[in-house]
Image (cartoon, rainbow, N blue to C red):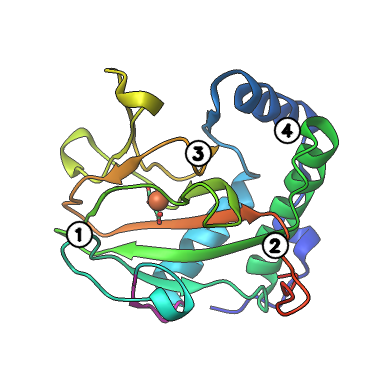
Amino acid sequence: MQFSDHAQSVGTAAPEPLFASIADDILQRGFSIVPNALPMALTHRLTDYAQQAVGFDPAGIGRNQQYQQNEFVRTDEICWIQGNAAVTAAWLNWMDCLKSYLNTRLFLGLFSYESHFAHYPPGSFYKRHFDAFQGQSNRVLSTVFYLNSDWGHNDGGELVIYPPDNQPDSINVTPLAGTLVIFLSEEFPHEVLPAKRDRFSIAGWFRVNDSTAQRVNPPN
Ligand SMILES: O=C(O)CCC(=O)C(=O)O
Ligand SMILES: [Fe+2]
């Protein structure tokens, strides 16, 4: 499949009311769950791209020196997004608009966004985890965008978001194409239940700048 068209033609228009409601949700609850978040055409293109064009590698845990593969924790495979196809450029552009909006509304100081496609083959899971630990990471907001054009009750693979402080009620999210989930990375433990079918998504993180004199964050 060719992706020679320009980002505009896959529809990058990002409605401000949508961004406003995401900001309100984050302010009030620390998370937001939005069905049909992106323009339909862009969701379709990303879905096709994930299923046909992506070279996946087994996922690991941690970054740099701490990076390790652990099949007891997660069994998905991933491919980091560089934005060198029109469709992934349109995705990064949409998330960049969201970043700017959230910075203006919530003063979060978000600096960059990193994201990867993820493929959970049948039987795959990601056990309960935090995406960031206080003081140890510059990941502030986690995002998950789903790329499965239909997903039934019996297909498993739901995202379970646990409330902070071990409160009882958790939230199950069906990984249906177009649904965008955003949550504060340090606040919400979450897990992916075993998927019974191939399950595709984009996981991403808005980060703050933790540059020091020794180490400069590349803006990705
Ligand atoms: O795919 C999902 O629903 C969540 C994935 C996740 O938690 C992660 O990649 O850190
Ligand atoms: Fe996660």
Q: Residue at x 68, y 21 (%)?
A: 24
Report the amino acid beneath label 1. Answer: Ser
Asked if residue 102 is positioned above or below residue 25 in the image, the reply reads below
Coordinates of residue 28 in the picture (x, y in percent): 61, 18
Asked if residue 87 is positioned above or below residue 142 in the image, the reply reads below
The mark lying in front, picked from 1 and 2, is 2
In this view of the protein, can residue 170 be seen by the observer? no
Q: In the rendered structure, which disc, 1 or 2, sits on the residue that comes first in sequence?
A: 1
Coordinates of residue 75 in the picture (x, y in percent): 23, 65
Q: Determine the secondary structure under disc 2.
A: loop
Residue 57 among magenta residues:
yes
Q: Which residue is mark 2?
A: 210
- Is the Cβ of the residue at disc 4 closer than 8 Å to that at disc 2? no
Q: Give the distance between the C-alpha atoms of the residues marked 4 and 3, in whole angstroms.
A: 13 Å
Q: Is mark 4 within 8 Å of ligand 1?
A: no
Q: Give the distance between the C-alpha atoms of the residues marked 1 and 2, in whole angstroms.
A: 33 Å
The mark lying in front, picked from 4 and 2, is 2
- Disc number at residue 181? 3
- Disc number at residue 124? 1
Report the amino acid beneath label 2. Answer: Asp
Residue bounds of the magenta highlight? 54-60
Q: Which residue is mark 4?
A: 19
For the residue carrying disc 2, how many other residues have a C-alpha within 10 Å: few (<14), some (14-19), or many (20+)? few
Q: Residue at x 74, y 68 (%)?
A: 211
For the residue carrying disc 1, how many other residues have a C-alpha within 10 Å: few (<14), some (14-19), or many (20+)? many
Report the amino acid beneath label 3. Answer: Val
Residue 169 among magenta residues:
no
